């Protein structure tokens, strides 16, 4: 019934390169060139300082003699070593162009990758069987789209940019090696020790932040209860106090404590990371200079390198967090995709225009493999031009059977036949195009999606008047002017949409329960007979025994089984049906 998960594995490291490989490659090259240019700035500046004998030590790097040469810019700005000044300006301009272009390209690719990944999730959700979608739940899906995707893309965006920082770091370390081997080895050791010790407060800080995040999730759930359970809370003071104390205040306190501890440790760790190079500068200045033959000029060069090396080191260290988060988020997304099996066929076939019979043969369905509730086996046949009532108590399986009839749920056993054609994975989506259903948890879209005909829009305006919605809602270019309606009005608007779809099978799950008495009569005495005259197959899930005489067939359910399947003989046996139904 379902395809195995053939979705390729999500890899945050290759997310951008798979989206736009050429642009990412160019961005990496430009970033690396900018990083190399950054590393050249210090020797260029040192070369420009004539007074320093260190300039002669690196003379072969820049083969030029500039001593004593000056240039007057704009006639009054005195520029020493104009050729080196021009080289410095060109180098800065080169860095600006390369780095700006690199980051701009990565930002654009990141947006494209975000859009593509979300579209992938949208498409996957649309292909998941309803029972699996209900099992996963909306919270997990929304968190994946709003949080996990952003973290994956952030990590993927940082990763290519690391090449620029690595190039700068390698270039500066190479220059440091050229200046003094002992200092170079000391700095390498300092970087390694600093990077390791930097992680200690960060790790503990993130643990506190994870606890704060868990508390925040509970706060969000509590907020839902505070808003949607406001009526119940107002009627019970003890419940309200207990709810606020245990479900909101307690988690708010936990969130505050853990978030403050986490922020403090992370801030301390990041500040420590920023100062690592300064610790190295202090050690070189106050200690190493006394043990190694470091001239004042060499010491100045070393200090400049150490000051300059701070930025790439901090950038590399700070990238560890987002990359770790991206790795975790990738795992969450991959787990989500693995939990979302896809239905096999998504073709463009249209539905059956003339549905004469709908038959269920030994149909069985179990919720999540739980043997405590099983529907079936069910054997029924529904006819064109008939209205069938599904009745029974709460939990009897009426809505579950309705979702099996509408092909939303996939049965574990048995067959469904449309006009003697068995429903298979290959044609299931095509047969769905013959069905309209309004369940109790229906969703009302703000637009008539898929209905573009001007004639249908005109017909929709007529239906608005018949359903007494014309004063509350209007339709402009297929868009409802408002969906802020009462529950009964929303169901009427949903009914309008099903009318416009003009399908062969109509399923109504307690549609009339939210209607006023006048409209309830309209539904049973006008709408259902109208659909019957149009030769539709109509299934009504209802508790209203006052209208059983309007049905052609009444099917009574209990605990997932069909107890009675009785044809209504012109109303002659209606009292018997009512007696049997109300006795359960």
Image (spheres, grey):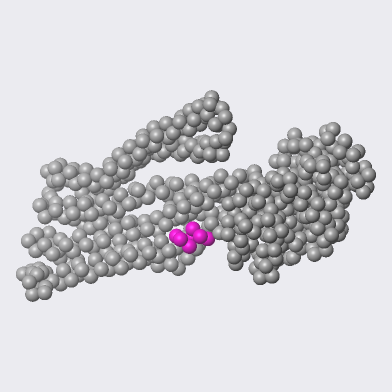
**Residue 455 position within the rendered picture, expressed as x and y whole percent measured from the top left:** 69, 70
Quick check: is 113 in the magenta stretch? Answer: yes
Residue 410 in view in this figure: no
Q: Is residue 201 left or right of residue 276?
A: right
**Residue 298 position within the rendered picture, expressed as x and y whole percent measured from the top left:** 14, 54
Residue drawn at 86 percent across, 57 percent down: 385
**Residue 355 position within the rendered picture, expressed as x and y whole percent measured from the top left:** 83, 60
- The residue sitting at the bottom extreme is 75
Q: Quadrant of the C terminus?
A: top right
Residue 267 in view in this figure: yes
Residues 269 and 416: in front is: 416
Residue drawn at 58 percent across, 59 percent down: 481
**Residue 449 position within the rendered picture, expressed as x and y whole percent measured from the top left:** 63, 62
Residue 1 vertical placement versus 69 (above, below):
above
Residue drawn at 55 percent across, 36 percent down: 230
Residues 239 and 263: in front is: 239
Q: In the rendered picture of this protein, how many numbered marks are placed on residues?
A: 0
The segment highlighted magenta reads 110-116
What secondary structure is the magenta-colored segment mainly? Answer: helix
Residues 423 and 515: in front is: 515
Residue drawn at 77 percent across, 49 percent down: 521
- The residue sitting at the left extreme is 68
Quick check: is 254 in the magenta stretch? Answer: no
């Amino acid at each position: 019934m379902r395809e195995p998960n053939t979705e390729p594995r999500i890899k945050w490291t290759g997310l951008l390169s798979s989206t736009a490989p050429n642009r990412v490659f160019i961005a990496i090259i430009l970033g690396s060139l900018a990083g190399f240019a950054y590393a050249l700035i210090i020797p260029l500046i040192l070369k420009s300082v004539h007074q320093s004998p260190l300039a002669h030590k690196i003379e072969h790097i820049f083969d030029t003699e500039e001593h004593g040469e000056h240039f007057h810019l704009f006639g009054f700005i005195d520029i020493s070593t104009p050729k080196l000044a021009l080289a410095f300006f060109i180098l800065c301009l080169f860095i600006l162009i390369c780095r700006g272009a690199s980051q701009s390209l990565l930002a654009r690719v990141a947006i494209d990758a975000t859009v593509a990944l979300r579209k992938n999730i949208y498409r996957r959700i649309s292909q998941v069987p309803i029972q699996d979608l209900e099992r996963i739940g909306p919270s997990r899906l929304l968190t994946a789209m709003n949080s996990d995707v952003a973290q994956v893309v952030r990590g993927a965006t940082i990763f290519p940019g690391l090449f620029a920082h690595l190039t700068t770091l390698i270039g500066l370390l190479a220059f440091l090696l050229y200046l003094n081997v002992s200092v170079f080895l000391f700095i390498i050791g300092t970087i390694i020790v600093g990077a390791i010790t930097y992680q200690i407060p960060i790790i503990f800080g993130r643990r506190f932040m994870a606890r704060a995040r868990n508390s925040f999730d509970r706060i969000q759930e509590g907020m839902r209860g505070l808003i949607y359970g406001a009526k119940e809370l107002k009627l019970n003071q003890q419940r309200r106090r207990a709810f606020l104390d245990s479900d909101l205040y307690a988690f708010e306190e936990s969130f505050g404590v853990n978030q403050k501890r986490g922020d403090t440790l992370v801030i301390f760790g990041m500040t420590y990371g920023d100062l690592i190079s300064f610790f190295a500068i202090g050690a070189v200045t106050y200690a190493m200079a006394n043990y190694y033959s470091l001239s004042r000029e060499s010491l100045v060069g070393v200090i400049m390198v150490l000051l300059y090396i701070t930025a790439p080191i901090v950038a590399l260290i700070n990238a560890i967090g987002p990359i770790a988060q991206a790795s975790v988020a990738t795992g969450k997304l991959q787990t989500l995709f693995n939990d979302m099996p896809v239905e096999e066929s998504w073709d463009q076939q249209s539905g059956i225009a003339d549905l004469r019979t709908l038959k269920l043969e030994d149909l069985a369905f179990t919720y999540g493999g739980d043997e405590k509730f099983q529907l079936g086996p069910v054997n029924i046949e529904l006819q064109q031009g008939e209205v069938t009532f599904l009745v029974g108590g709460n939990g009897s399986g009426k809505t579950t059977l309705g979702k099996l009839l509408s092909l939303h749920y996939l049965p574990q056993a048995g067959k469904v036949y449309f006009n003697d054609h068995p429903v298979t994975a290959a044609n299931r989506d095509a047969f769905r195009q013959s069905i309209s259903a309004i369940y109790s948890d229906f969703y009302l879209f703000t637009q008539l999606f898929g209905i573009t005909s001007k004639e249908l829009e005109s017909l929709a305006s007529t239906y608005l008047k018949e359903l007494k919605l014309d004063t509350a809602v209007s339709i402009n270019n297929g868009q409802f002017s408002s969906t802020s309606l009462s529950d009964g009005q929303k169901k009427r608007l949903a009914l309008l949409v099903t009318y416009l779809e003009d399908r062969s099978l109509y399923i109504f799950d307690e549609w009339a329960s939210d209607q006023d008495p006048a409209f309830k009569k309209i539904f049973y005495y006008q709408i259902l007979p109208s659909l019957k005259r149009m030769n539709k197959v109509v299934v009504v899930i209802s508790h209203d025994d006052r209208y059983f005489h309007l049905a052609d067939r009444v099917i009574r359910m209990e605990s997932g089984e069909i107890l009675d399947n009785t044809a209504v003989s012109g109303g002659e046996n209606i009292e018997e049906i009512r007696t049997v139904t109300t006795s359960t």
